[in-house]
Structure formats: structure tokens, C-alpha cells
Amino acid sequence: GNSVTQMEGPVTLSEEAFLTINCTYTATGYPSLFWYVQYPGEGLQLLLKATKADDKGSNKGFEATYRKETTSFHLEKGSVQVSDSAVYFCALRITQGGSEKLVFGKGTKLTVNP
Amino acid sequence: DSGVTQTPKHLITATGQRVTLRCSPRSGDLSVYWYQQSLDQGLQFLIQYYNGEERAKGNILERFSAQQFPDLHSELNLSSLELGDSALYFCASSPYLTGRDTQYFGPGTRLTVL
């Protein structure tokens, strides 16, 4: 079946530290991959996406590369800020039979301390 | 602000009751999706509508139903509520049926069943 596995955390870092949140997936075909972010008390916001193998998505200093050979889409940021504190969700998009849905990982809570 | 609106923001009700959650998609978006976020199940896809027609069902209980109206807003009806239905319910929208854009999420409705 289709599934996403991501490190559950919580992850606590100091400001300016390097961030990696691991995400691997299981899917048939070639799904599009996404990272969404949920700030406290808010809905989900798209952070970045990649639609095919070797694509690199990037936004706000965050990056993730679609690795088909390792079925991974790890999220990285070189220098985190306090404002990056949020829950991060890795997701894949399943498209079939004239419909689509997102399958999410369980989320990783990131806390960045000053 | 994604442009997707959801009402109410919070809902507190008792077991056995019925509630209706409302979603207005972004202007021009024809697809509406409903997701449930709970502590034990994480973020799960419930159902997709496209231009008034149901297109896909996920892990949606028989006690739950949804519809999309001619003006494209959608309602999720939850009946015979149980304690375990307490969750954050998200609506998302996109312009197309499948695969050509991301899903834009609303702020969610937090349902508490007492």
C-alpha cells in the first residue's frame, strides 16, 4: 500500500543549527512528494514539493530532494530560526481513477530555542 | 491565508449528537477534500468532491457524510458522535480533479465530543 514514514521527534534544536527530518515512502508508480508545515493553532501550509525523481523542492531556506532509489524525501535546512518551530508533515499524492488524495506521515514537531 | 475558509473554528458537543462542518474553497477551485487529524490516527484522508460529485473515499466512517453544493462549498456531516470523533477536521481545495496543483488547506475545525 501507500505510506509515508517520517521521524516522529520531537526535535529540539538551538537557533542556527542544521536540521534534517527524514521521510521515506512506499508507493506504486511515481507519486509527487510534499512537505507541509503546521504552525501552532494554524492549518497546514505547503512548504515545498517535488513531482519527479531528482527534483529538488526549496522554499524559505528549506530543501528536499526526491530520491527514487532510496524512496526518500528528507527535509533539510542549514540554519534554523525560532520562527521555524512547528510540526512538519511529509506527504505523497496518490492519483488514481480520476481522483487524488494525500497520504501523510505522522508529523515531526520541531522546537527551536534561542 | 490559503483562501480556504472553514466554520466553525471550534465545536463542542455531546456523544450521540450530529454536527455539520462547513468549508468554502478558494475562488475557482473545483475540488474539495476533507481530512481528519487525530492524535492516534494522524492526518487521514476522508473524501474528495469535484464539481459536486464524489470522487474518492478514504477512511470515512458510515456515520459521516459529505456533499458539495452548486456554489462549490462543502459540508461534512458527522452523526451519532462518539468520543473518538474528537479531532481537527481540515478542508482543502485545488483547481483540478487530479495531479496538476497542490491542495490548499483551511485552518480547520476543532471538534470536541464530551
Image: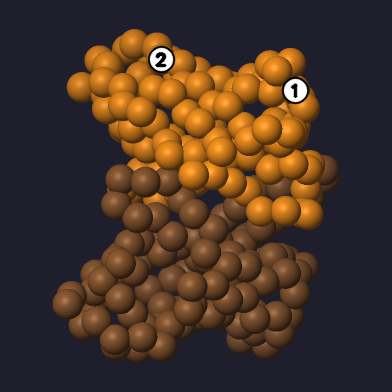
* Rendered residue at 41%/64% (across/down): A88
- Chain for disc number 1: B
**Above or below: residue A32 compared with residue A14:** above
Q: Would residue A8 be seen by someone viewing this image from the given angle?
A: no
**Above or below: residue B9 compared with residue A10:** above
Q: Name the side, left or right, on which A53 lies relative to A70.
A: right
Q: Which residue is mark 2?
A: B19
Q: Specify which label sits upstream in the sequence, 1 or 2.
A: 2
Q: Secondary structure at mark 2?
A: strand
Farthest residue to the left: give it.
A114
Q: Name the side, left or right, on which A55 lies relative to A74.
A: right
Residue A69, picture quadrant = bottom right
Q: Name the side, left or right, on which A93 lies relative to A103.
A: right
Chain B colour in the picture: orange
Q: Position of residue B41 (x, y in %)?
A: 39, 48
Question: Which residue is nearer to you in this view: B67 or B24?
Answer: B24
**Above or below: residue B31 compared with residue A52:** above
* Rendered residue at 59%/46% (across/down): B104
* Rendered residue at 49%/77% (across/down): A62
Q: Position of residue A70 (x, y in %)?
A: 61, 86
Q: Position of residue B54 (x, y in %)?
A: 72, 28
The image's colouring method is by chain
Q: Amino acid at mark 2?
A: Val
Q: Which residue is mark 1?
A: B52
- Badge 2: residue crowd in 10 Å (few <14, some 14–19, many ≥20): some
Q: Which chain is brown?
A: A
Q: Amino acid at mark 1?
A: Gly
Are the residues tagged 1 and 2 within 8 Å (C-beta)? Answer: no
- How far apart, in angstroms, are the residues tagged by discs 1 and 2? 21 Å
Where's the N terminus of chain A, which quadrant? bottom right
Question: Which residue is nearer to you in this view: A3 or A9?
Answer: A9
